[in-house]
Image (spheres, helix red, strand yellow):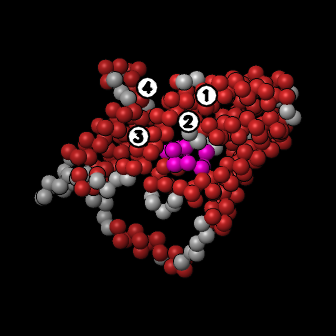
Amino acid sequence: MMIGVPAVVVLLPLAWLLITQYSFRFKVSRDLLKDDFIQKEAAKLGAFSRAELLVSIIIGLAAFFWIFRDVLTGFFPWLHLSDAGIAITAALLLFILPASRPDRQRLLEWDDAKKIRWDILILFGGGLALAGAINTSGLATWIGGATSVLAFLPTFLFLVGIFVIIVLLGELASNTAVAAIFLPVAGASAAGLGLDPVLLVMSVALAATIGFMLPVATPPNAIVFGSGAIKVQDMLKTGAMLDVISIIIVAILVMTIGPALFSL
């Protein structure tokens, strides 16, 4: 939090400027600036329907079971909860429960399911498969060990170098897996660099969350790409610039406010 919050405070406006003023410039309609715009749009939605209530309950329950899966498994081991099982159960309920009583139309019909961007799901699934192959083959571990040669560089260059490797690998592999590989490297290198091990480990964990170039990097990236409003080349161009900015900002924060915070 001591490093993450300052990073967000700095990066959020920079990301907004890069996206809205450089990469995807657009003009705001004057209608959006009117005081009653939100009220009019809300009125168009109408009253909260039975179908909307049921969908909200199902999604809320799915999120609840995802968040507290480990806790619930401890109390009720016979449930055999898994992330995939929860998602499939929620989807089945949407296909089974009726949206309205008169026509008995379901909450989710197959015609609706056919409109889902399955290509994006397959793309993201391919990224997960590639990440699994990188980890299983030992390539990720080898890359993590090879970064030890960067320890001979000046501290700032070492941070930038290891952050670049983490971000590039994180564009293809799981952020959690990348962090697990590089955290021991960071802890072992901290003493030689004269940095607090906790500070360096925190900064590596923060760098593992950077990844804006590819749709497969993170679920939010896949959601944005799935909207169809952005092309892969646009995401690569803007994401690469945002990755570079994020790496430099995080490295600067670690070198400047990091030692002051951990000396308290």
- Amino acid carrying mark 4 in the image: Val
Is residue 3 shown left or right of residue 40?
A: right
For marks 4 and 1, the one nearer the N-term is: 4
Find the distance from the CA under tag 3 to the CA under tag 4.
14 Å
**CB-based contact (under 8 Å), mark 3 and mark 4:** no
Q: Main secondary structure of the magenta part?
A: loop
Q: Is residue 218 magenta?
A: yes
Camera-nearest label, 4 or 2: 2
Disc number at residue 63? 3
In the image, the segment drawn in magenta is: 211-220
In the image, 49 versus 22, the foreground residue is 22
- Amino acid carrying mark 2 in the image: Ala
- Amino acid carrying mark 3 in the image: Ala
Disc number at residue 173? 2
Find the distance from the CA under tag 4 to the CA under tag 1.
31 Å
**CB-based contact (under 8 Å), mark 2 and mark 1:** yes
- Amino acid carrying mark 1 in the image: Ala
List the residue tagged with mark 1: 140
List the residue tagged with mark 4: 71
Q: Position of residue 254 (x, y in %)?
A: 79, 39
**CB-based contact (under 8 Å), mark 1 and mark 3:** no
SS state under label 3 = helix
